Amino acid sequence: MSKNNLSSIEKQIIEILKSYPDASIPVPILGDSLGLTSKKAAKKLKQAVNRLKQLEIVRVSKGNLVRLNEVAVKDKDTLTGKLDVTSRGDGYVIVEGRDEDIKIPSRQMATALDGDTVEVKLTGYHKKSGKAIGKIESVVKRAKSIFVGVLHQEAKNTYIIKPDQQSSRVDFFVEKNDLNGAKPGEKVTFSLVNWDNKGAYPQGKIQSRLGEAGSNEANILSILAEKQFEADFPKEVFDYAEQIPDEIPQKEIDRRLDMRDDAVVTIDPADAKDFDDGLSIKILDNGNYYLGVHIADVTYYMPRESILDEEAYHRGTSVYLVDRTISMLPERLSNGLCSLRPNEDKLAYSCFMEIAPNGKLVNHSIKETVIHSKERFVYDEVQDILDGKKQHEFEPELKMLEKLAHTLLDKRFREGSIKFETPEPKFVLDDNGKPVDVIIKERIFAHKLIEECMLMANKTVALHVKNLRTKKSKDDHPFFYRVHGEPDLEKLQNIKETAKPIGVNFDIKGKVTSKQINSLLEEVEDTSLENIINGLMLRAMSKAEYSPKNIGHFGLGFSDYAHFTSPIRRYPDVIVHRLLKRYSSGGTEYTYDELLDSGEYCSERERYAVEAERDSVKLKQVEYLSERLGQDFTGVISGVTENGIYVLINDIYCEGMVRVSDLKDDYYVYNPEMHCLTGRSKGKKYRLGDSIKIKVTNTDLGRRQIDLTIADF
């Protein structure tokens, strides 16, 4: 039907929606805009909206939200976005600035793979859900350079790779000349050579052999490769690091502030080897603290755009897996030249802060230094000294740090920091990497002591640049911030609905505040819901990112914040050091646009590293329970769906699922509002937060899944 056949009201509705093409507008707001507020006019408006819906010119979603149907607008037929492929083979294209994703049926996926940037053409909308459906027109950019899978031999000289679920939705064929020595049954990494025809197999080329499929080594290396990380450094990078001199030139020492006689100490985990931060502290005559946070001076050893720098940027971050660390820098630097090891002269970049007894920053300076760490402490040792269980010559300094840390911690929470405490499982492994025990890491005040000092330094360097801008324009001093936006209100609303049936009130009206979030977290503290609500709240939070756009850090409650304290393991800290040094000398280092690009890249690498770390933990949890099939455990119901209940197993902090089909004693009905399953005949309920006894019945290492049944049966 042409526009000429539309009524005046229908045409006006279309014009309003065209002005807000990416918005869903409530029908009452449309009525207000058109002046249709009377009962009779509202009826006409409803009729007009329904007619436009029948003509597929608009879509009406739940809550009477109206938006223009993009299919009806020719200049919006093709969109560009990122493809996310599900385990079932369907995909969703995520388009920036668009409220909802576009579903791609598997048959319309063309030659696109998970994570690719694609052009998608809108083809219609689902009749029931109203969600957009499309087909992929072309691949704009491949997301992955490394894929992972198991090599199989189908026939003589015929080889295929069956990718891990996370890598791809199709098998790859490999020519004999591209096997690179791999044998059938081995886990391998491979690259995509060619895939132009969706009716044919894509062609792969094997890059490396990870080991026999199912082995611990292959499983761990697969997790790394899935996230585009490689354990080994290229030979040329390794050689570059090896030729760096051990000795610090006297000329370099002479130009720095010499702190070698001061009492600088490091505090790290017992198994740490890369010590990138040290502390010094004293009380000034005016009663203020003088805190020094001394950070390994990585940039001295890593010139910008050197082969070492390019590799560090490519990696973006160190990755901390359960049984190993994949470092951002070669070991010669991370554990040697840059590491602030005790009783050795080391180059540092130091932030000195004069802090009043109430925690307020009075003055500061940032200087290149040379230090000589007097003691390498571990957390438990420091805690014993603070608790009076052990004596040490540096006890006065540690007590000062403890008192200051308490002040800074209290001040931070008063001013808007969110109090997150989530359990962290730690595995005891045998010589083959198999988990033999799981313990939950204890969070002691020694951890918080270090954390508060590092947060203060990170905050101070960001304020330092802010102060520089009072003299020059913002463009002369672009900076690299650690930013964290406000939480997702829709997800917070879900938390409210989750907590309500179990008597917890989370009242959010308008803009949410950290005080409201902290009140909820305090209310569920030491209850069966604590870990569940903490987990939901973390998922509701925006992802922290790196950017030259300073929007502040919501989670910490800081208006200015940067990462300065870990350049051995985080590339953004390297960028921050370079910016600070160059500003100190009166020059410039990075442009705003360069920082924008680096922020997007470093944020993505960090997300991949976090995902790899979580996957390695989940793998070990599944391995651990694989040896305990048939055993009973207690847990807490952490999620309820129509398909079954999720259970967070106590002591292991690991989640498995009881399928509704395995609840044999009754027919269970799902109540989404009450977050429970209820037996139709006997009335038995399985509710969110309930304690429950379960039995481990099956595990899948490949999918990293755990199947459970109710132990009472």
Image (cartoon, rainbow, N blue to C red):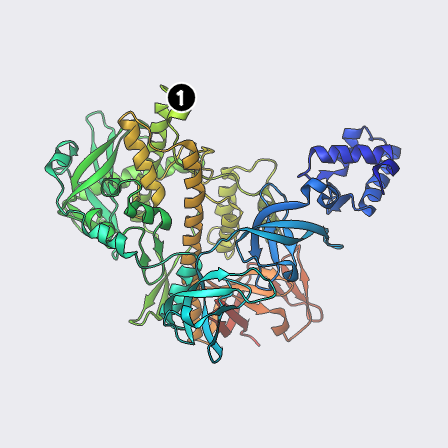
All told, the count of numbered labels is: 1
* Residue 595 screen position, x and y as percent: 41, 36
Quadrant the C terminus occupies: bottom right
Q: Mark 1 points at which residue?
A: 473
Which residue lies at the image location 73% right of the left edge and 36% below the top edge?
Answer: 17
Amino acid beneath label 1:
Ser
406 and 429: which is toward the camera: 429
Q: Is residue 389 visible?
A: no
296 and 282: which is toward the camera: 296
Q: Can residue 412 be seen in this view?
A: yes
Label 1: element kind? loop
Q: Which residue lies furthest to the front in this view?
A: 177
- Occupied quadrant, residue 586: top left
266 vs 45, left or right, is left
10 and 62: which is toward the camera: 10
Which residue lies at the image location 67% right of the left edge and 62% below the top edge?
Answer: 670
* Residue 181 screen position, x and y as percent: 36, 72
Up/down of 616 relative to 375, above or below? below
- Occupied quadrant, residue 34: top right
591 vs 116, left or right, is left
314 vs 364, left or right, is right
* Residue 640 screen position, x and y as percent: 60, 61
528 vs 411, left or right, is right
* Residue 371 screen position, x and y as percent: 16, 40
Which residue lies at the image location 65% right of the left edge and 58% below the top edge?
Answer: 108
Label 1 neighbour load within 10 Å: few <14, some 14-19, many 20+: few
Q: Residue furthest bottom?
A: 156
Quadrant the N terminus occupies: top right
Up/down of 71 relative to 659, above or below? above
